[in-house]
Amino acid sequence: AQKVTQAQTEISVVEKEDVTLDCVYETRDTTYYLFWYKQPPSGELVFLIRRNSFDEQNEISGRYSWNFQKSTSSFNFTITASQVVDSAVYFCALSHILTGGGNKLTFGTGTQLKVEL
Amino acid sequence: DTEVTQTPKHLVMGMTNKKSLKCEQHMGHRAMYWYKQKAKKPPELMFVYSYEKLSINESVPSRFSPECPNSSLLNLHLHALQPEDSALYLCASSQYQGTGVSGTTKIYGYTFGSGTRLTVV
């Protein structure tokens, strides 16, 4: 069974602080993908990153960076120099390949990030 | 065009009404999905269509009826809903390559629409 754990329910930081959102996953699949999505109050899920299980290179995109460690089944997300616009719920998700085609995403419970001035 | 478009954005319906949610994508994605998201909860998968055929039904009540008229469109027909069905309904599409056997499928995108916020009264 697929499982994603985001232990941090809510994080509050002051603008310009760095913040790391944790994600731990469980799967028996040998091939899988991990995702991070941002969900602002308006409700849409904004895609941030997709990483496959064979690529353990860390990735940086502007103020965002991701640390994938297969040995600890973790895929953590760091925002450097946080801004008020980063305030949102962040979801980590794990894919499972469906035999009929397509992929099911199992989401963690999400982390509410509040960035204050 | 890298978007998934959902209409309407908001819907209020009575328990005896029949309504439909619509989803459209023009990215050539071959898999389309309906997810349901209750307040302060993560999205949960309802249905999967792959190459216009229903691939997965996650034990969803029959008052929800999906339809995939063509590779770009996905509908969700609603009938006799209950107040507890009030939620954000998200459509998504993805492109993949390979068979369903683990180790042979690659995902090239998984895009969500902005959702339909449904209230059942």
Image (cartoon, rainbow, N blue to C red):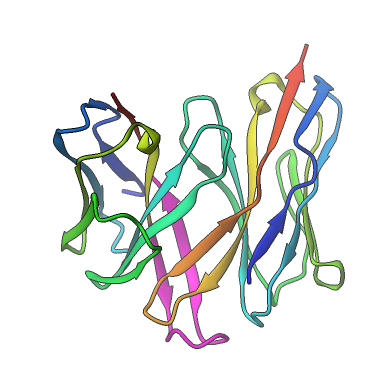
Residue B109 painted magenta: yes
Where B67 sits versus A36, above or below? below
| Helix, strand or loop: magenta stretch | strand
Please tell me which residue lies in front, B117 or A35: B117
Residue A47 painted magenta: no
Q: Is residue A65 left or right of residue B30?
A: right
Q: Quadrant of residue B30?
A: bottom left
x, y percentage for residue B53? 23, 72
Please tell me which residue lies in front, B17 or B43: B17
Q: Which residues are magenta?
A: B93-112
Quarter of the picture holding the N terminus of chain A: bottom right
x, y percentage for residue B71? 20, 64
Quarter of the picture holding the C terminus of chain A: top right
Where B32 sits versus A12, above or below? below
Q: Is residue B76 left or right of residue B46?
A: left
Q: Residue furthest top?
A: A117
Q: Quadrant of residue B59?
A: bottom left
Q: Residue at x 52, y 87 (%)?
A: B104
x, y percentage for residue B16? 15, 33
Q: Quadrant of residue A95?
A: bottom right
Q: Residue at x 58, y 33 (%)?
A: B40
Q: Is residue A87 left or right of residue B88?
A: right
